[in-house]
Image: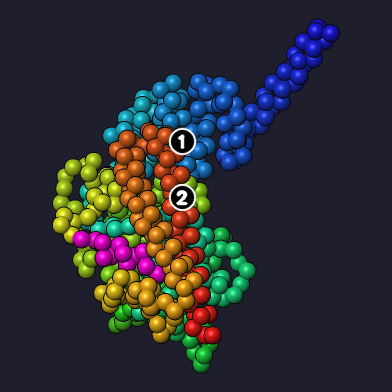
Amino acid sequence: MKTRIIVLFSVLAAAFISVCAQTLDEAKIWFQEGRYADALPVFRAEYEINPNNPSLNLWIGISEYKTGNEFGAEKYLQFASKKNQVDACLYLGDLYAKTYRMKEAEDEYAKYERAKRRDKDALAVLEPRREYAERLSSLLRKVEDVQIIDSVVVEKKAFLSAYKLSAASGSLLPKNEFFDTQNEDDNVLYINELKDKIYYGQGDPASGLDLYTMEKLLGNFGNEKRLPASVNTSGDEAYPFVMPDGLTLYFASTGNGSIGGYDLFVTRYNLSADSYLNPSWQNMPFNSPFNDYMMAIDEDRGIGWFASDRYQPEGKVCVYTFIPSRSVVLLDNNDEQYLAKRARIASIRDSWREGVDYSPLLADLQSSDSSPAQESKGDFSFVINDEHSYHSLSDFNSDKARNLFSQAEEKEKRLSSMKQELAEKREQFANSGGNNSALRTSILQLEQETESLWKETEQLKIQSRNEEIRSNTH
C-alpha cells in the first residue's frame, strides 16, 4: 500500500513539474512577444520556488518595468545585473536615469557596453538611452523653485475630485459627461466661467488626440475648431486649462519635445497673429519621465494643481497642490542630490519657505469651499448653496447636519496627520534609494488609508450639506 502511495505521489509530482515547465515555456514565449503582463504571474510563481535563478530575476525585472512598476522591478534587475545578466544592466540603467540617479545609470550602461563591445546592434540600442539620460541630467540643472504644499493619491478615473476651483477659474469635468456619451476615455473638458466656451481633447488611437474648442451660439455649443499646429502635434494633446484672461492655455502633450509620456506645456494666444505661440515646456518638478498632466491654476485662491503617475501603482495618480509664481525662479543650488530630490518631489516640505505659515492655505484645501481663501470668516467656510456659506457650527439649523459636519472635521484632522506621516515616509524612501521594501509597503498602505479617509470626509460633507438643505426647505 505504501509503495502504491509513493508511486502515485511520484507520478503526480512529475505531472506537476511537467505542467509548470510547460507554463514557464509559454511564459517565455509571451515575454518574447511583449506580453509582459501575461508572463509576469507565471514568473512570480516560479520565483517562489527558485528565487536565486538569475534568468528568472531578469524576466521578472523587465516585465515589472515594462508594465509600469519601476520600483518593483529594481531588486530583480539589481540581482540579475550582479549575476552578469547583461540585459538587466540596460533596464537598470534606464530605471536609475528615470529616478535621477545618473552616476548609477552610467555605471550600468558602461557595464552593458563592456559586455557588448563587439555587438554593433546592441551598442546602437544603448546610444539613445545615454542621450536621454544626458538630457535628463541637463534638465536637472534647471529645476524650478516651486512651493508644493500638499499632495493626495487618488484613483486616476476620479482624479478631478482633487481639483477645487473657484467659480472664476471655470470648471473641469470628464468630457463624456459634458457631451453625455458612453465613451470610456479619460479625456477632460474645460469650460470657462461664463460657460460659453469649452476646450477638450478628441481623437482615437490611430490618429491621436488633438485639442479642440467650441463656443456657445444661440444657446448651443457649436462651431468646433481644432487648435493650430503650434499646439497640436503628431503626438497626443489633452487635459486643457485656460486662465481667466482667455489667452493662456495649459495642456499636456506627448509631443512638443516631451521627456516621457505626457508632459505639461503652456502657451498664449497671439491676438495679432490669430494663433498660439510655440508652447513652453514646464520645468521640473512639474515634468518628469512619467506622465504629468492637468495643470490648473486658481488665481482667486492663489493655488494650483497638477497630476502625475510618477512612482504610483497602476490606476493611481498623485495630485500635487502648489503656489503659482508670477515668474519662473530656478533653484540656486549646485548640489546634484538636492536638485534630484526637488525634481522627484521626494518631500514636499523641502520646497517650503523658511518662516512662511502655510496653515491658512492648507486649511483652505481641507475645506470644500471653492470661494477665495482670503474671504473666509469664522472657524471654517462651508458652502451650502449658491446663496449661503457657513462659518461656524452654530450656523447649522439641522442637528443631524451639524453632527455630520463635525464628524467630517474630525476626520480632516486625522487626514492632515496622515498626510504629514506619508510625506515623511516618502522622504525616507527617497533617501533610501528606493531599496526599502518594508517602507514601500507601508507607504502604499498609508496611501490607500489616506485616500479612503479623504473619500469618507467628502461623503460626510455631502451628506451634511444635503441634510441642511433638506431641513431648510421644510
Q: Main secondary structure of the magenta part?
A: helix
Specify whether residue 366 is painted magenta: yes
- Residue 2 sits above or below residue 200 on the image: above
Q: Which mark is first along the chain, 1 or 2?
A: 1
The 10 Å Cα crowd at callout 1, few under 14, some 14 to 19, many 20 or more, is many
> Dividing the picture into quarters, in which one does residue 431 lie?
top left
Helix, strand or loop status at disc 2: helix
Helix, strand or loop status at disc 1: helix
Q: Nearer the viewer, residue 264 or 231?
A: 264
Residue 147: x, y in percent?
Answer: 25, 58
Q: Amino acid at mark 1?
A: Ala
The 10 Å Cα crowd at callout 2, few under 14, some 14 to 19, many 20 or more, is some
The residue sitting at 54% across, 66% down in the picture is: 203
> Dividing the picture into quarters, in which one does residue 193 lie?
bottom left
The residue sitting at 46% across, 30% down in the picture is: 76
Specify whether residue 67 is painted magenta: no
Q: Is residue 305 visible?
A: yes
Question: The C terminus is located in which quarter?
Answer: bottom right
Q: Magenta stretch: give its range.
A: 357-368
Question: The N terminus is located in which quarter?
Answer: top right
Q: What residue is shown with label 1? A: 73
Q: Amino acid at mark 2?
A: Glu
Q: Nearer the viewer, residue 282 or 380?
A: 380
Q: What residue is shown with label 2? A: 449
Quick check: 268 left or right of 294?
left
Q: Is residue 125 visible?
A: no
Residue 324: x, y in percent?
Answer: 26, 65
The residue sitting at 28% across, 57% down in the picture is: 148
> Dividing the picture into quarters, in which one does residue 326 lie?
bottom left
